[in-house]
Structure formats: C-alpha cells, structure tokens
Image (cartoon, rainbow, N blue to C red):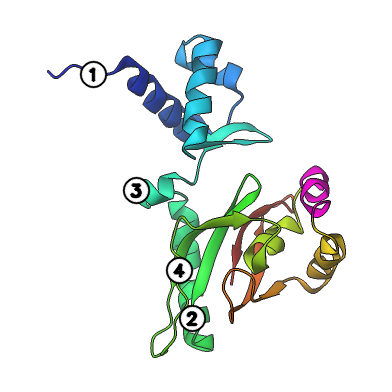
Amino acid sequence: MAETSKTVDQAVRVMHQIRATGAAPTAELARRLGLGRTVVARLVATLERHDLVRRTPDGVDLGYGLVGLADMVSPAMRHIARPHLQRLATAFHETAVLAVVDGDDAVAVDQVVAEGRVVRVHYHPGTRHSLAAAAHGRAMLAHADPSTIDRLASAAPGLGAELDRIRRRGYAVSHDELEHGVTGIAAPILDGAGRPLASLG
C-alpha cells in the first residue's frame, strides 16, 4: 500500500465528520474525531483558506469551494431548484442562476442558459461576489443577520435603504454591476426561521 499523509487524512476526516453530523464548533469536531483542539483548529484554518469549509453561526460547515472541485455541494438544493431554473430560462429567454450564501459572499452553484439567444450571460458555478453586490447578493443580504447587514451596509451608502425595499417587494434588481449591459433580478430562498439559504433569478 502506498504511503499516505496523516495531515491530509485528518483534513478529510474533518470534512466527512461535518458531512455526517452537520456544522459544529471546532472543539466539538475535535472531540468527535478524537483529535487535539489545536490540531483541528489548524486543519479548519487551512481548509477555510481554500473554501473547503466555512464558519457559520452553528460552527464549521462544508464550504462552497467544493463546487469547483466536484460540483457536488448542495446537491439536494440544486436538484430541487433545477426545474425552476429551467422554467425561468424558458419563460424569459435569459440565463437563470442559483446562488448560495458563503460567509459574506454569494456563490453561484448552478445555472441554466437560455437557448436561442445571440448574446448569452454565463454565471459559472463557483463564481462568487460580495453579498452587497448585484441582485443575487442583495436578495440574500436583505435577510441576513443584523451584524452582517450592518458590517456590509456601512461601506456602501444607500445600501440599507435598498435592503429595506428588497424586503418589502420580495426581490432584488441590479443594473450594470457585475457586467456592463446586464440586468439581474433575484429572489431569496429562506429557511423556516427566515434566514437566507440561496437566491434564484
């Protein structure tokens, strides 16, 4: 048998543990894995640097950087959203995109590109931008926790008022932000507590 790397093995064990039992604080992951807290903290910091894990209010969770590696992050959500993406693309003859929250960013995880268009917009899975930017980001930011809203809105004059409008009408609109000549419209997908999981548009 080929020689293996103990560190890589431990890092993979961290990700498998999160997949099996859900997000957890670093100390709890260390306890479940039977590893030292310092060891797990270093592993998490390295995995986070590569977007393979992310920090959430519930602890360390899997990261959306895995999308670019295996296109397998959030398969259930992508499976559920895919028919809606297809209907949107067909009805409006435009690219339809599913994005998710990753820290302070919106990350595209799936898209359906409309057929029959001379000019098409591509929003490749793994593409990310700030929650404060564009329709997908702001649709989710409008329903984020107050500390996240305050932190991101403080650097963008007028964003607070725009988020209020998004919450009232239920969707976000952007013009010429990520690409000149492109208009985006996106609505948030919320969990049972009203927290943003994703956006569709």
Q: Earlier in the sequence, mark 1 or mark 4?
A: 1
List x then y, in percent, for residue 154.
84, 51
Q: Residues within 10 Å of mark 4 (few under 14, many from 20)?
A: many
At 51% from the left and 30% from the top, the residue drawn is 21
Is 112 drawn above or below residue 10 in the view shown?
below
Q: Tags 3 and 2 in contact by the CB under 8 Å rule?
A: no
Q: Which of the 4 image quarters holds residue 165?
A: bottom right
For mark 2, what is the residue? Answer: 89
Please say if the residues under marks 1 and 2 sit with CB atoms less than 8 Å apart. no
Disc 1 from disc 2: Cα separation: 46 Å
Looking at the image, which residue is at 52% across and 33% down? 48
Q: Secondary structure at mark 4?
A: strand
Q: Disc 1 designates what residue?
A: 4
Q: Which residue sits furthest left?
A: 1
Q: Is residue 165 something that shows in the picture?
A: yes
Q: Which residue is mark 4?
A: 111
Q: CA distance from mark 4 to mark 2?
A: 9 Å
